[in-house]
Amino acid sequence: MFKSKVTLAVTGASGSGYFLRLLKSLIDVDVQIYLLLSDAAKIVLKTEENEAWPEDVDELNFFLADKYQSKEKQVIALTAKDWFSPVASGSSAPDKMIICPCSCGTMASLAQGLSNNLIERSADVILKERGQLIIMPRETPFSTVHLRNMLTLSELGVTVMPLAPGFYHQPKTIADLHDFMTARVMDHLKISHNIGKRWCE
């Protein structure tokens, strides 16, 4: 029914606009998405993008289907307590996961193999099953602890993709910056797209 499926997690780091653009882009290319939002992510989403998403998960799923005009069950929002969801087990989870944006606190938990919530458990599943995990931290400056955690995760096969867009495409709007990073994620997921200009185009 869908071309592929991914887990998309959102934590409390700044950069909600990147997440929104990535979510829409994945929907547009017929990808099924298991969506995980931390409580802090919802606060940042309201602060940065003035979007107040429903707290009730059933209402949230209806809201997302209407907002993005997605197919039935294309976006499946989960709660932090959905331990029986597919993303919590290696026998059923998607083999690709993106955390955008990824807080440094979440990054630290992943580096230590913690599973205190469904986001951390989902990432732990990807790691143990040798799947593809992309984390997109948004912080500055990075402390030595942050950098060590990034190195640990990189050594485990995680793609560390800081939300640091380039400027060679001469962006005119914030949306252009969102497009730049979304295109890089789509490339790493091996998903065809027509987002933005490539180098020398």
Image (cartoon, grey):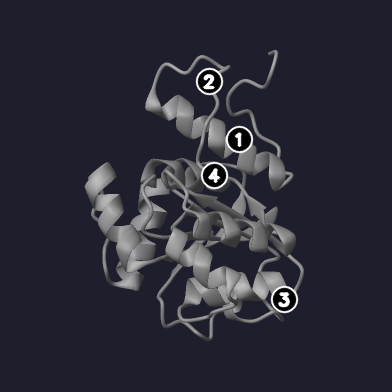
Name the disc covering residue 128, or none. 3
Which comes before the other along the chain, label 4 or label 3? 3
Disc 2 and disc 4 in contact, CB within 8 angstroms: no
Q: Name the residue under label 2.
A: 167
- Residue 35 in view of the camera: no
Query: Which corner quadrant of the image does residue 74 belong to?
Result: bottom right
Q: Callout 1, which amino acid? A: Ala
Looking at the figure, which quarter contains the C terminus?
top right
Label 4 to label 3: alpha-carbon separation = 23 Å
Q: Name the residue under label 1.
A: 183
Q: Where residue 175 appears, x then y in whole percent?
A: 42, 29
Whole-number angstrom distance, CA of label 2 to CA of label 4: 15 Å
Q: Which residue lies furthest to the right in this view?
A: 130
- The mark lying in front, picked from 4 and 1, is 4
Residue 173, picture quadrant: top left
Mark 1 and mark 2: span between their CA atoms? 14 Å
Residue 166, visible in the rendered structure: yes
Local SS, label 1: helix
Of circles 4 and 3, which is in front? 4
Q: Rounded to the nearest whole Å, what is the CA distance between mark 1 and mark 3?
A: 27 Å
Q: Is residue 47 above or below residue 61?
A: above
- For badge 3, the amino acid type reads Lys
